[in-house]
Amino acid sequence: MTPTLTGTKKVVTGNHAVSYGAMLARVQVISAYPITPQTQIVELLSEMCANGTLRAKFIKVESEHSAMAALIGAASAGARAFTATSAHGLALMHEMLHWAAGARLPIVMADVNRAMGPPWSVWTDQNDSLSQRDVGWMQVYCESNQEVLDTVIQAYKVAEKVLMPAMLVLDAFVLSHTAEQIEIPNQTLVDQYLPPYQPVYKLDVNDPRSFGALAPPDVYMELRYKMHQAMEEALTEWAKADEEYYELFGRRYGLIEPYRADDADLILVTSGTVTSTAREVIDELRAEGRRVGLLKIRVLRPFPAQLVREALADAQKVAVIDRNISFGMGGIFAQEIKSALYNTHDRPPIFGFVAGLGGRDITPKVIQEIIEYTESHDEPEDLIWVGVKR
Amino acid sequence: MKKPIVFTSEREMPPMAVSLADMGHNRTGSWRYLRPVYREKIAPCKNACPVGNDIPRILSLVSEGRYEDAWRLFRETSPLPGVCGRVCYHPCESFCNRKNFDEALSIASLERFVADACFDLEDRIPERPKRSEKIAIVGSGPAGLTCAYFLAKDGYAVTVFEAASQPGGMLRLGIPPYRLPREVLDREIELIARWGVEFRTNTKIGQDISIEKLWEQHDAVFIATGAHRGRALNIPGEELAIQGLEFLKAVNVGKTIALGKQVLIIGGGNTAMDCARTALRLGAQPVVVYRRTRDEMPAIAEEIEEAEHEGVQFEFLAAPVALRRLNGKLEVQCIRMQLGEPDASGRRRPVPIPGSDFIMRADAVLKAVGEEPELSFLSEHVETSEGIVIERAHGILERAGIFIGGDAQTGPSTVAQAMRSGKETAQAIKSFLRGERKPKPKKLEEALRVNFSYFVHQPRVPMPHMPVAERITNFSETKRAISSERARAEAQRCFSCGVCNSCDNCWVFCPDAAITRIDGTYEVNYDFCKGCGVCAEECPRNVISLVEEEL
């Protein structure tokens, strides 16, 4: 790290960490529709646009569907495009999410994880983002405000390399509205890390081309194959982008992060802010001499299956905490991990826990109960509801 | 089209569905079945204006504070903006698109404002070839004045013959000064005279000079003598009533008339309203007796309201059947009416209720049940009914060069309609003298589809009035002028329907980038316009039309 190009320390909320990330990434077009708990992200960005801190076009729209449509237009014309949304707003974007991915537009979006209604809720869980798991967007679940800011910048780096859109995900209120000290990187260094977007194909009246036209069956499948290839490639690109970021800014996160998991008999798998709580519990239990470890899943799409397999290879038991529910099946992270491990030999039994829906707190005590339940049971269970009043 | 590119493996393919070749050859315009065309349209206000004042452009000038330019633009189409700003029934406002958004523009008060603001200005009279043809205009009311103005502007030698001692016709004799101050009328007549129009007053046709003589001495004659003969009530004792119009004329030329306190006015038209309000100002307590109800009254709504505000009383569904003099008073025997089936005018016919007679007492009775043209000077030459010419085939009107217009032709109508007639006659006379066919009026498309999303609500500027107590003691003008600030604010409310103001909406919204800007105007590249119609939809002022492509 060049000492003269250090960043500035600032106490900011997770939402504003997103805004600063977008600012440093020098996004050129922002289009958004307000929704709790996301609104502060675009509020700050609109102020930056208004006062000239950020030279970007801020397009006000009447819905999230239009917000994404506007970004699709902007990105098609070669602009670096950004938006933020949450829950129902994300759901409304659904059609356009497919379009952005199919058109291979490296749009980056922040989704503040908020439970879907009804019943109405503004608190966190992951069902909104996981409902969009298969639309062709990369998904990165963040644990801290610093990670949020860094992920915005990394996301553009990877997205523009592989031409797939990326969504960074942060928990409602636990991150979005909670302030902590972060480092705002130096702009010159960020510019060095993230040069301007150079699209290969773009809308240009002087070079007219057709975009998104009808693809007959003899080419459609190839284009889908290439999207999947791009996602595979993204696994490597995330790793590279993370390393390069570390070299310039001194921070890296990995696609997954094992924590005290090397010799663990039981590995707890988490995502989002639950991870921070789990770290504390693991430390306490380790202090008691218990062989427990943690695996944080940061990048869910593309799914780092090989890394997950390696991380869990030596565990005797795995407990997955899902702050989401696929009705009629169970927690979605648990399904992903089971599916990644199924074709391996000597796979550990996997316990699936669903907890903290609709913003219910996942306290150290809850995590401890999950660990103890897993330790005390031999046969794996697909779905254990944690803390449901029955 | 170029040779198609065939992919043999995914590696040859681009990442997304994008054409590798230039798609310039793909003329997407060929998909179109509707074609957007920039076609400025006539604003409904302008279309409704009997003299065709270019209201949107005039208001645009007012909004910029360019009052002189606005006034000159008025004078292109009308010699009487000061008069019209006060007495016109402003059909422009009834058709204003803005009335469907909040309230119609206050066009009349703006016309008056412009005329007042430019009261001292003169027309710029250019050097123009004098024409040898001489034209006689009989009557100096709005029809005669307007015809004279447009002929004189073209260099014709125009003489206007007027029976009264001053020109103006019904504007001077019929309309009371509290509605039309005489200095305004005098000024606008003076400006018409500046174009070389000669006024010969105190010259009554058929008495001081014959129509035959005029015809012999001129190349064209326009008969615009108006409708001055008051209709009769045809009831016993009729002679005890005064003709309302004669009463107005007398007051308007400054004669002193003693009516007494109780005055009945028979009739529900504009003359009746003028009579009532004039009588009020002479100290009377006028009561309007009308055989139908307020809804059927033919007077302009505004005049009825003003009369009501000033304290004129109304006796509806009553008709006089006889007049008598009794002990120095007049006794009017009336019968109560009820409304029956609609008549030819569409208004419900008044039907007497048998045995419902009642008596009203008065010091004076004014009859104002309509006027008709007085065309006795033509009587040997044409056949008339209720004064209106019905047969001209063998009469003098059939002679080349004789024209008739205004109220003399139609019976009593409005100032603006008389002006329209005068203007059209001027054109007809020009065509006649030049041996051309009368030009056919162009059919213009109206701008009716204003996109309200682009405008903000703004209330109409109210027309200030003098307080009633102050009004009824004298003949000063009842309406007051609006301020310059208010005039500009009001003019800024104008949508400018059908007039492009280079707002760029079409250019911004075109999803095919098929519109180009050229010096504030726009051009559609039809090779690439798919005819989606977004431009027409988003045009705030209805300038763009969608026309079906011919297949």
Image (spheres, coloured by chain):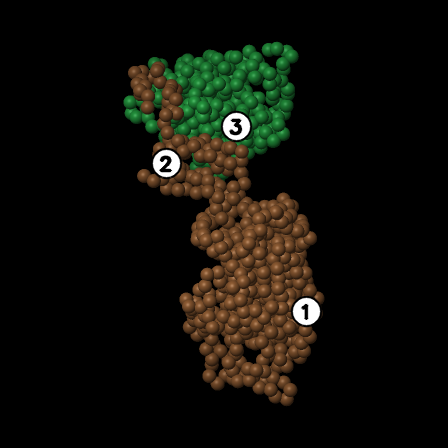
Chain colours: A green, B brown
SS at mark 1 in the image: loop
Looking at the rendered structure, whether the residues under marks 1 and 2 are on a common chain is answered as: yes
Seen in the picture, residue B141 relative to A157 is either above or below; the reply is: below
* Residue under the point 41% across and 28% down: A99
Percent x, y of residue B444 = 45, 49
Does residue A133 appear in this view?
no
Nearer to us of marks 3 and 2 is: 2
Going from the N terminus, do you reach mark 1 or mark 2 first?
2
SS at mark 3 in the image: strand
- Viewer-closest of B281 and B449: B281
Looking at the rendered structure, whether the residues under marks 1 and 3 are on a common chain is answered as: no
Q: Are marks 1 and 2 in contact (CB under 8 Å)?
A: no
Q: What amino acid is labelled 3 in the image?
A: Val
Q: What amino acid is labelled 2 in the image?
A: Arg
Q: Are marks 3 and 2 in contact (CB under 8 Å)?
A: no
Nearer to us of marks 1 and 3 is: 1
Q: Chain of mark 1?
A: B
- Viewer-closest of B88 and B300: B88
Which residue was labeled with disc 2?
A: B32
* Residue under the point 50% across and 19% down: A197
